[in-house]
C-alpha cells in the first residue's frame, strides 16, 4: 500500500487527534473514511468492479441486438430488369 506524507497546521492536527480519540479510532481510520467520502462525493469508484461498471454505463453503449437477415441478399432477374 503506498504511503504519502501530509502536513496539517497545529489546530487541525489537534482537532483530528481529538476526534480520533473520541471515536476510538486511529488517524489512518479517519483518513480512510475521509477519502472514501471524498471519492463518493465526486462519483469516483474505489474498486475495479465499480470502475468497470461505471465505464460501461457512462458510454451509453448497450449490447448490440442480433442482426436480422432480410431475404437472401440476392436479386432476382426480374428486379434487375426493372432498373
Image (spheres, grey):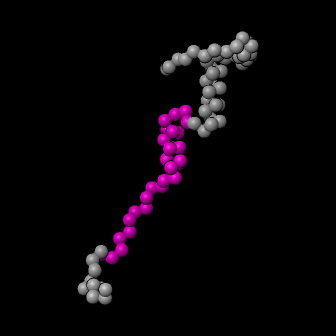
Q: Is residue 24 visible?
A: no
Which residues make up the magenta segment?
45-72
Classify residue 10 as left or right of residue 3: right
Query: 21 or 81, which lies in front?
Result: 81
Q: Quadrant of the C terminus?
A: bottom left
Q: Is residue 2 above or below residue 75?
A: above
Q: Is residue 65 part of the magenta span, yes or no?
A: yes
Residue 49 versus residue 36 in the image, above or below: below
> Which quadrant of the figure has residue 65?
bottom left
For this rendering, which residue is in front, 9 or 45? 9
The reply to whether the magenta stretch includes residue 66 is yes
Asked if residue 68 shows in the view, the reply is: yes
Residue 8 in the image: above or below residue 71? above
At horizontal 62% and vertical 27% (from top left) the residue drawn is 35
Query: In the image, residue 72 lies at what x, y percent?
Result: 29, 75
Res 81 quadrant in image = bottom left
What residue sits 61% from the left and 29% below the top? 36
Vertical placement of residue 29 versus 47, above or below:
above
Q: Residue furthest front?
A: 83
Counting from the top left corner in percent of width and height, residue 17 is at 70, 13
Residue at the (60%, 39%) spot, across then down: 43
The x and y percentages for residue 30 are: 65, 21
Q: Residue furthest left?
A: 77
Amino acid at each position: 500500500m503506498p504511503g504519502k506524507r501530509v502536513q496539517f497546521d497545529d489546530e487541525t492536527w489537534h482537532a483530528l487527534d481529538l476526534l480520533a480519540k473520541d471515536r476510538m479510532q486511529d488517524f489512518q481510520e479517519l483518513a480512510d473514511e475521509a477519502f472514501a467520502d471524498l471519492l463518493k462525493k465526486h462519483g469516483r469508484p474505489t474498486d475495479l468492479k465499480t470502475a468497470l461498471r461505471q465505464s460501461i454505463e457512462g458510454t451509453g453503449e448497450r449490447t448490440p441486438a442480433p442482426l436480422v437477415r432480410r431475404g437472401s441478399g440476392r436479386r432476382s432477374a426480374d428486379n434487375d430488369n426493372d432498373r
